[in-house]
Image: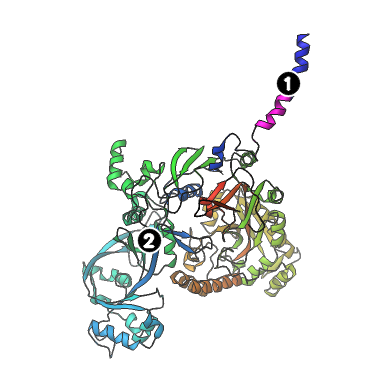
């Protein structure tokens, strides 16, 4: 009888238990019930762990996201993608330009003395109003003797350099430079064309026939001829030195209480340039000539040459000198029993326990599990609303999704096929935006098939990109027409994408002499229009594009084979080696308009980024002028011209920029605190580049889903 009762009542009891548990187990909507601390903690789900928590050493996205919360740079971008002050309260940019005084007798009818020569130039160019108004001051810098070394190739016979390990062997040649007097022009605004009227006044002959041998002397006279190719480098006749002076915020402190000052900025620069640290950021700071503190809260950066993107390098998080200088590193090395000479910042414990000036303070790192930060209550701007930030490592995409449903993480990156469904779900707030990435088909123009821009245009016209967006991306993408991110001012929205016009494409190819043979393939001069299209494995979207492009071109009579390779093989054996016909790839671009590495004709060698071999003198000219221009309006105008030229030449078939969609808990809002202490809640919204994290320090999770009025 007892057994019978147990068998009857046990299932009933279990049902009652499960039913009542529904009311005490927190759901997604009530995840803070019984756990109010959940409202002041933001949990971010990340697919990968960080590598190193040091901004000058990190190169991965995850490390950078944590570093961005722990460290501050001198400047960054505001919600409209304009520069804004951070650790620098303000800054000014100007230029010091130098002109070598010509040797006596080199120019007729000009005074021979340096000071008289300077006055003569000012008098002669005074009618050039814009040029003259830009002058802040003019002075003569007396010449002085300098010693140096030039690097020359080791030769094995006339004109035959010795090669070791695939590289030319070099040696050093000592020289003495008796530098002539120079005229120093200090300019209000940086001007890449400043010397144009000066050269016109003096005549190009002055610069072409300058007697360098009067001023540059090899220590060993037999080496003089080897110095000849370095004359213009050793003694530049004109020189642009752009300058940035940063005024730094006072009373900013690192998380350990130590006050931030100009010494920390100088130290960060020196740490980046120190070869022992092997920083991946070195090339960003190579244009710098000198960094000079002008006081505890002012610092002057002088550049070797015109390079307008250089200001972006000061987004870099600033390191604490007192914790990472030579004295501190030597002490740490001694404690660890390590070689003090070899010990560097890369070996320091601070890479796992970082100290910055940012809105969050580092607390804990459990490898492959989580990184925990806490809010900096003394942050110089205002303390963040969240008391704690936790990045949880959740490598599996499905697990991330389930964790989000359960309220265990606060964010989820939606897959394209999920977007339509999630946008209808009232539980979550969603944000879709295009970013800095675009996809393309690139043509190796070393292949005679792709030499003609008209051929490349025809190939692009045969592909229905709108169908790729609709069926492969589930509508989560937009057409692009050129080399800049669509969200930036550099992109010209007036340029129309190639039409989908297979008949028009075939007409172009027929007009170029390509006619169908008996097998139905296009042929010209006995050669069939045939090539390989490749991409990397692990990307199903690119794999689908291969098939779509292949089918589209075959309809025209083009024989296209497709292949997929593992990323390392794809990069090493094909892209870097320039041994391919056409490929499907994408670029993740930056915020500045400098396209030198990707599109300049000097960058077409193996292992360089202009691997399609695109060459256009007009494009080269624009690229160089853009990277030397400091006036944004002029940059935008030239960038649009560059965009039009590249779109006309079609070195790529520009395809699309994919949208990214983020989900957030709907209870997360932006908080604005009024002077009386009251709070105003507003919806989270993306900035111009689609970022929703710009206002993260103002984010707060509240107990219930807020009810906003229309437009609020």
Q: Nearer the viewer, residue 205 or 361?
A: 361
User: Which numbered disc covers residue 286?
Assistant: 2
Residue numbers of the magenta segment: 16-28
Mark 2 crowdedness (10 Å alpha carbons): few <14, some 14-19, many ≥20: few
**Residue 475's image quarter?**
bottom right
- Residue 653 makes an appearance in the image: yes
Residue 456, percent from left and from top: 63, 68
Q: Confirm whether the magenta stretch covers residue 22.
A: yes
* Left or right, 161 with reference to 404: left
Image quadrant in which the C terminus is located? bottom right
Judged from the image, the secondary structure of the residue bearing numbered disc 1 is helix
Q: Closest to the observer: 20 or 224?
A: 20
Q: CA distance from mark 2 to mark 1?
A: 74 Å
Task: Give the image quarter of residue 170.
Answer: bottom left
Main secondary-structure element of the magenta-colored stretch: helix
Where is residue 436? Give x, y as percent. 56, 59
Residue 394, image x, y percentages: 57, 40
Q: Which residue is mark 1?
A: 13
The quadrant of the image that shows the N terminus is top right
The scheme the figure's colours follow is rainbow
Asked whether, in this view, residue 663 is left or right of residue 361, the answer is right
Q: Seen in the image, is 496 located left or right of residue 232?
A: right
| Front-most of residues 283 and 652 | 283
Element class at badge 2: loop
N-terminal-most mark, 2 or 1: 1
């Amino acid at each position: 009888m007892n057994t019978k009762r147990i068998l009857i009542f046990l299932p009933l009891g279990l049902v009652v238990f499960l039913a009542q548990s529904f009311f005490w187990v927190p759901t997604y909507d009530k995840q803070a019930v019984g756990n109010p601390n959940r409202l002041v903690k933001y949990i971010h789900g990340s697919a990968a762990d960080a590598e190193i928590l040091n901004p000058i050493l990190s190169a991965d996205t995850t490390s950078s996201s944590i570093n961005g919360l722990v460290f501050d740079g001198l400047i960054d971008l505001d919600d409209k993608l304009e520069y804004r002050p951070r650790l620098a309260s303000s800054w000014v940019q100007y230029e010091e330009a130098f002109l070598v005084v010509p040797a006596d007798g080199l120019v007729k009818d000009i005074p021979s003395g340096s000071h008289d020569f300077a006055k003569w130039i000012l008098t002669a160019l005074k009618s050039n109003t814009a040029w003259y108004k830009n002058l802040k001051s003019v002075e003569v810098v007396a010449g002085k003797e300098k010693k140096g070394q030039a690097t020359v190739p080791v030769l094995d016979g006339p004109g035959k350099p010795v090669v070791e390990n695939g590289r030319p062997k070099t040696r050093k040649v000592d020289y003495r430079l008796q530098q002539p007097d120079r005229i120093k022009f200090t300019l209000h605004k940086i001007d890449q064309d400043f010397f144009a009227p000066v050269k016109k006044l003096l005549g190009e002959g002055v610069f072409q026939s300058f007697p360098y041998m009067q001023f540059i002397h090899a220590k060993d006279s037999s080496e003089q001829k080897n110095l000849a190719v370095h004359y213009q480098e050793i003694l530049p006749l004109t020189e642009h030195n752009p300058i940035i002076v940063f005024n730094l915020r006072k009373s900013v402190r690192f998380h350990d209480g130590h006050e931030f000052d100009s010494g920390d900025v100088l130290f960060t620069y020196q740490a980046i340039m120190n070869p022992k640290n092997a920083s991946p950021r070195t090339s960003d700071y190579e244009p710098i000539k000198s960094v000079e503190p002008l006081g505890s809260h002012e610092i002057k950066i002088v550049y070797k040459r015109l390079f307008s993107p250089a200001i972006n390098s000061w987004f870099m998080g600033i390191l604490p000198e007192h914790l990472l200088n030579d004295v501190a590193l030597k002490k740490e090395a001694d404690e660890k029993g390590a070689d003090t000479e070899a010990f560097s910042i890369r070996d320091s414990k601070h890479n796992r326990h970082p100290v910055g000036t940012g809105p969050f303070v580092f607390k804990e790192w459990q490898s492959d599990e989580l990184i925990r930060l806490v809010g900096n209550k003394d942050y110089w701007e205002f303390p963040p609303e969240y008391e704690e930030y936790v990045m949880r490592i959740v490598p599996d995409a499905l697990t991330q999704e389930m964790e989000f449903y359960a309220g265990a993480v606060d964010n989820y990156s939606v897959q394209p096929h999920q977007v339509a469904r999630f946008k209808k779900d009232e539980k979550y707030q969603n944000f879709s935006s295009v970013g800095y990435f675009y996809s393309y088909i690139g043509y190796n123009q070393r292949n005679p098939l792709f030499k003609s821009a008209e051929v490349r245009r025809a190939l692009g016209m045969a592909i229905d990109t709108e169908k790729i967006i609709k069926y492969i991306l589930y509508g989560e993408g937009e057409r692009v027409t050129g080399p800049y991110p669509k969200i930036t001012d550099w992109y010209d929205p007036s340029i129309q994408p190639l039409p989908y016009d297979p008949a028009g494409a075939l007409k172009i190819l027929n007009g170029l002499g390509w006619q169908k043979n008996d097998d139905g393939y296009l042929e010209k001069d006995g050669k069939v229009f045939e090539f390989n299209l490749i991409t990397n494995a692990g990307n199903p979207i690119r794999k689908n594009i291969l098939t779509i492009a292949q089918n589209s071109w075959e309809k025209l009579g083009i024989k296209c084979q497709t292949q997929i390779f593992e990323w390392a093989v794809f990069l090493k054996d094909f892209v870097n080696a320039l041994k391919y016909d056409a490929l499907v790839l994408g670029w993740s671009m930056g915020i500045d308009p400098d396209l030198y590495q990707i599109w300049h004709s000097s960058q077409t060698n193996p292992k360089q980024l202009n691997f399609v071999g695109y060459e256009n003198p007009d494009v080269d000219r624009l690229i160089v002028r853009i990277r030397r221009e400091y006036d944004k309006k002029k940059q935008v105008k030239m960038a649009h011209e560059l965009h039009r030229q590249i779109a006309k030449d079609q070195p790529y078939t520009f395809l699309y920029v994919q949208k990214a969609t983020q989900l957030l808990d709907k209870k997360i809002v932006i908080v604005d605190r009024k002077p009386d202490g009251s709070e105003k809640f507003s919806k989270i919204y993306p900035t111009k580049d689609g970022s929703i994290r710009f206002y993260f320090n103002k984010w707060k999770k509240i107990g219930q889903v807020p009810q906003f009025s229309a437009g609020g």
